[in-house]
Amino acid sequence: MSLDLLHPAERRRLAPMMPPEPHHEVVIRPLGAGDSKSVIATSRIIKFVQGLFEDLGADDWKSRLAAMRGIRRDPDGRLKLSLPIHRSHQLALFEVACLQPGTPRLDPKKIVSQGLVIRRYRAGRWQGWMNQGKKVSGWLDIGLTDADPDPARRHSSHPANRAVREAIARTKAPSNLAEEVVDLYLAPPDVCSARGRTILFAVLPIASDSRSDDPPPRVDYAALQGEDRRLMEEHFSSYLKARARTPLPCAGATLSKAWNALSSKPQPPSAADAAQLGALATFLQQMSVELDWQGPGAGARALKSEMDRIQLPTRDSHGRATTVSASVFVDKATRILLGGEDNKDGFVMPLEWPKIDSATGTRLTRAALDCLSARHAQLVTSPGKFEVASDLFAVRGFIRVKGPEGCQDRLVWSQPSETFRVAAWWDGDGPTTRISLPDLSQLGKLKPNVTFEMPPFLGNLLKGDMKKLSDGEGSEPSKLGLGWLCSFSIPIITLCAFIVLNIFLSLFDIFLRWMLFIKICIPIPVKKEGG
């Protein structure tokens, strides 16, 4: 029965309970009605938006767009999108049409809003870049790929369906995650009229430095199995495993910062001690840098507890036999042998590292693995939005079409674009940036144009004897506490850096054979003065 036959008052009462009238069928598709490979176009001109409108207004617009599509592909045929720093700008292009004979363009006035999403394809599932209020949740699986990216709109419904939808919603966990949306813009009216199409476009923000606020997945090193576990345990110093009683290098001698086997010029008491000091220094560095064994984590506390139980035989200043815990030894030896601190307490090298039985060795190794897990959590951040080179992405556009009076707007999705990868910052394929270096005859004209402010210690250091500095002797900080302002010419700094770069490139080329790929020099004619 048509509501038009009812009394107006009765019609108003029944209207909210009636199912919505059928929507006018529309479609959002790649501009030119092409396939999934037609969505993304690449422009390499500076005024790329203005250039896009100019191309769309031309009679040969289809061939111009075709030349902008699929410009760069990986060896496997996958589309690769370059970044703006490569002088490449990526555009998504759609058209909106009515699903009627001839597919006429949709009146833009019927579009309430429009946008697109960039989704990641991983392990057979689509993921969206999600936000929850001000918190960035990162890539999360999308249950319903056609759901509205706006949670407020996602949960709205026509009154006739509300009761059923609310009953279904009660069986599911509530979600207020919003999928990040990129704005789609309507092309100028004259461009749309020239093509007889309602054209939507967007610039793809693939240079985003956004990353999730959630911590990255925790790596549990102690849970590693098989070959991975064997390689990790093999990586650890032998001081962290079961081992036989072993004499220590320079036993009974007072520790000296000159013994540092990891420095460029170590000065061990004898050649026989050098190898053992090297192994000991590697252990100390592993404890302090890799494992952060004095950190607050449970693994660090367990490792310190095990080190406290290990007693190293030594002699006091009067020659009497005594012991020192391994934790005290590691702490002092690290500060003296690696940190270069003076041995003001006259701390001496213990006589030996005692036998470590299998059970103690297992506990040491387990604690070290737990320390690595904590260290990983400290140092590793969540990957950026487009940071993983192997990730695959696709673009999907949508429009919200104005519904009949009393009905909600209708969400219409496009099909996904072809999947693509995002090039790394160093993986450029665009035009090179040209930097002109000054001629040597012009150096006298170059005036200082940048000033460095140096604290007293650094200024005094650079004014000192460079020979002593290269030998690691350094220079004492200024007693007067004078800072320094030093001005230089940026072109001269660039020239010096360029000369040093070429020297090192030539040296490394002996081993890496990379000059053929990283340096291209071609001659150019130079105009003579007065010519």
Image (spheres, helix red, strand yellow):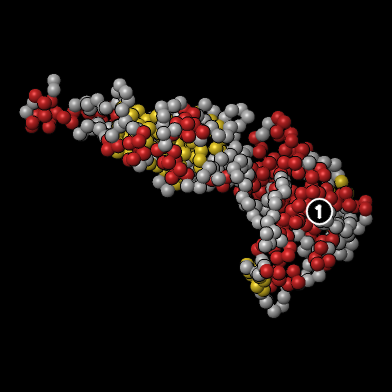
Residue that appears at 78% across and 61% down: 340
Residue that appears at 41% across and 34% down: 59
Question: In this view of the protein, which residue sits in the foreground, 435 or 146?
Answer: 435
Q: Which quadrant: the C terminus?
A: bottom right
Q: Which residue is mark 1?
A: 262
Q: Which quadrant: the N terminus?
A: top left
Q: Position of residue 9 (x, y in %)?
A: 8, 32
Q: Position of residue 303 (x, y in %)?
A: 70, 47
Total numbered badges shown on the rendered structure: 1
* Residue 410 to residue 273: above or below: above
Q: Position of residue 74 (x, y in %)?
A: 61, 32
| Camera sees residue 332 | no
Mark 1, other Cα within 10 Å: few <14 / some 14–19 / many ≥20:
some
Question: In this view of the protein, which residue sits in the foreground, 82 or 414?
Answer: 82
* Residue 348 to residue 305: above or below: below
Q: Quadrant of residue 428?
A: top right
Residue that appears at 30% across and 32% down: 106
Q: Position of residue 121 (x, y in %)?
A: 51, 31
Question: In this view of the protein, which residue sits in the foreground, 398 or 364?
Answer: 398
* Residue 408 to residue 378: above or below: above
Q: Quadrant of residue 87?
A: top right
Q: Is residue 372 left or right of residue 212?
A: right
Q: Residue furthest left?
A: 7
| Camera sees residue 265 | yes
Amino acid carrying label 1: it is: Leu
